[in-house]
Amino acid sequence: MAYKLTKQQIKKELIKCGKSAHYFINNYVRIQHPMDGIVPFKMFDFQGDTLDSLINYRFNVVLKARQLGLSTLSAAYIAWLMLFHRGKSILIVATKKETAANLLKKVKLVYKMLPEWFFQLADIKIENTWTLELTNASIAKAASTSSDVGRSEALSLLVVDEAAYVEGMDELWSGIYYTLSTGGSCIALSTPAGASGWFYNICMDAQAGLNDFYLTTLMWYVHPDRDQAWFDKETKSMSKRQIAAELLCSFNLSGETVIAPEDIERIEEACTEPVRRTGFDRNYWIWQEFNEEGSYLMVADVSRGDGNDYSAFHVIRLDTMAVVAEYKGKPEHDMYSDFLFQVGMEYGECMIVVENNNLGIAVLNRLKERGYRNVYHSLKGSHEYVDQIAAEGHSNAIPGFTTSTKTRPLLVAKLEEYIRHNSITLPSLRLVDELRTFIWNNGKAEHAKGRNDDLVMSLAIGCWVRDTVLIANQREQEYREAFLNAMTMTRTNFNSQIRGQYGFNDRTSFFEGWDHMSEEKEKAKEFGWLIGTKA
């Protein structure tokens, strides 16, 4: 027979539980274990520390490894909050409404597994798949991630499960944030899913102290039952991305980035501070000054003019394939044209390749007006390179480089090849930041939502032009020189006339020397008597 508490003991226990969520969870919460069924929830130290954060901080973001029981901990915390606090309004959001409902199901289980005397505080008033409401007016709902979710009600607590995978979380947060303005709290927990998106930005800003979120990071080894042997066994059949996402809490290695995460890490480790930050906005970074022994290529992207877009360019030294200078900013287009002219002249009037989008044409025209003599031109349709002088007389030649649905995949592939083979030196942290958020989206390489890829695409055009235009032209020139050097000067004349043709001279042979020999023979006939010879 189970031990029964007296009314006085029950009262004391309720007071203890109300004062301490730790006491409530460790002594009265029971959970569903996948192997052992319903078992008491005895928190590990890391779970207890996390619970303290949930209680002490209004906004919490938890970056975690898989299977650490954080969803279960959140469910227990929600149950405590609803039971011991009147009129709490809690909203649970996840990647899918069903996933949110599963977390709510855990809350229901916690409540139903409590001793009956807890129900004198509050009993269940409404219960269905999406809602749990108690008689003390506390309510928890599971909802989809539509942009208008939660707008019409003030929230006490918002819980976002697997926040890194919730589509449109930026828009959802901007709409729901004001429902927390009366003092509501937020718990966002997730494994990482690449270095972009709302969850990534919240974590990075929290780490830098730029927002109100308190960051908790829980690696795989915080669980006391896990050691290196466990890790080695678990990761045998996992990819690097899976390991990064599910165990290592690594944003950089967990996403579907176009450039391999390990290559991005390698580039970042080799990044250096520029020797000079200059220009009208100090966004022109220089690592190496002009060297007369080097040859240079300048590749520029022109902004569309919207808030998320930048103008950018790289200066690449071709013989060493090192980025020696870089710019990223938002200048006026006339100013940008003059800036390109100035930098191009500083680097030996190097070839300038400008992406010829609508605004790029204006920049190219300005360069032409100023008399820049080394602007990249190509033929319409074929993208075949023609030099600027030849382009003047070619009606099918256009200035600049055209990025299209056909050329963009080629550019990206060439950039990836250069980086993968470590064939280019990239010293810029600004570029690394863009590479981290340059991702595959439905098979297309593009920047993550809210980010940009201006430096990435500028560099990609540079790699493609260098490899398919300049190197190809250099090889063609070498072939021509080799062909000409192989030719020898000869005085041989070829007689293309045949017997019977007008003008045929049977004394003319294939070799010019034949005529001289015939003349000498005639002379010998005529003057042979002088030297005692016979004709």
Image (cartoon, rainbow, N blue to C red):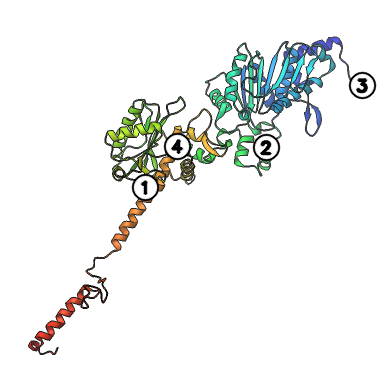
User: What's the amino acid at mark 1?
Assistant: Leu
**Quadrant in the picture for residue 202:** top right
Residue behind mark 1: 470
Q: Nearer the viewer, residue 482 or 213?
A: 482
How far separated are the C-alphas under marks 2 and 3?
41 Å
User: What's the amino acid at mark 4?
Assistant: Met
Quadrant in which the N terminus is drawn: top right
**Quadrant in the picture for residue 57:** top right
Residues tagged 1 and 2 counted as in contact (Cβ below 8 A): no
User: What's the amino acid at mark 3?
Assistant: Met
Residue behind mark 4: 457
Which mark is first along the chain, 3 or 2? Answer: 3
Label number found at residue 1: 3
**Quadrant in the picture for residue 98:** top right
Callout 1 environment at 10 Å: few (<14), some (14 to 19), or many (20+)? some
Circle 2 SS class: loop
Residue behind mark 2: 227
Q: Nearer the viewer, residue 8 or 84?
A: 84
Residues tagged 2 and 3 counted as in contact (Cβ below 8 A): no
Q: Is residue 316 left or right of residue 405?
A: left
Callout 4 environment at 10 Å: few (<14), some (14 to 19), or many (20+)? many
Which mark is first along the chain, 1 or 3? Answer: 3
Q: Is residue 72 left or right of residue 524?
A: right
How far separated are the C-alphas under marks 4 and 1?
18 Å
Rendered residue at 76%/23% (across/down): 129
In the image, residue 128 above or below residue 498:
above
How far separated are the C-alphas under marks 1 and 2?
54 Å
| Res. 450 in view | yes
